[in-house]
Amino acid sequence: MSRIDSFKCRKTLTVGAKKYVYYSLAAAEKNGLKGISALPYSMKVLLENLLRAEDGTTVTKADIEAVAKWLDDKGKAEKEIAFRPARVLMQDFTGVPAVVDLAAMRDAMKALGGNPQKINPLVPVDLVIDHSVIVDEFGSPKAFKKNVDLEYSRNGERYRFLKWGQQAFKNFRVVPPGTGICHQVNTEYLAQTVWTPRKR
């Protein structure tokens, strides 16, 4: 949660006995970010993320103002921002290499005398295996099971590695092949609407 609130938009919402902090774009607009209500929705999501993460170092007042200026420059300023997602959803085509990179970073940390347990995703990561299954069998009630079984037999080493990764890394889950495509699995099983800070 931000300690800096340059645009005086930090608000509290009480639901029952609980209080939640949020960052109001309407208040930010009144307090210096003129016209942001006209931003595309995706830009509003980025802007709220920066308001919430403003710390004066990784996210500055100028970073926040740069997103608001998109209304004028449509991104021509090419300002890089420090977006911090609440979670990451990956599919196997790109996700498996990312897990390999994390494992290599752990090896490097150990070789340098550090604690390899410090290498973990910073936010929750869900890896959905949805690109690997090949349709060898079709037109029968047993086709689905046979295709998933073939996938495990062809790529057993990969799944042993991913099982290790799920046990070794904090904040990392694997959804096995045959469950569905990542977008649908995300909507039906994984995603949540409201995120609150985790206690560390």
Image (spheres, grey):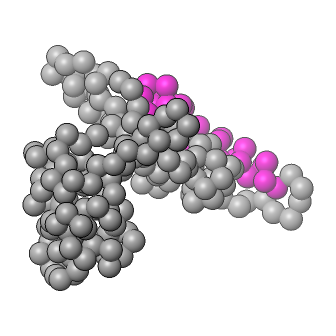
Report if residue 109 lies within the magenta region: no
Residue at position x 86%, y 65% in the image: 139
Residue at position x 52%, y 41% in the image: 15
| Residue 186 x/y as whole percent | 58, 53
114 or 12, which is in the foreground? 12
Asked whether residue 60 is in view, the answer is: yes
Horizontal arrangement in the rendering, residue 80 relative to residue 35 (left or right) = left
Quarter that holds the N terminus: top left
| Residue 41 x/y as whole percent | 39, 71
Examine the image and state in which quarter residue 110 appears: top left
Horizontal arrangement in the rendering, residue 171 relative to residue 56 (left or right) = right
Asked whether residue 100 is in view, the answer is: no
Quarter that holds the C terminus: top left
* 161 w.r.t. 25: above or below: above
Residue at position x 16%, y 82% in the image: 73
Horizontal arrangement in the rendering, residue 29 relative to residue 137 (left or right) = left
| Residue 19 x/y as whole percent | 44, 37
Q: Which residues are magenta?
A: 143-171
91 or 48, which is in the foreground? 48
Report if residue 162 lies within the magenta region: yes
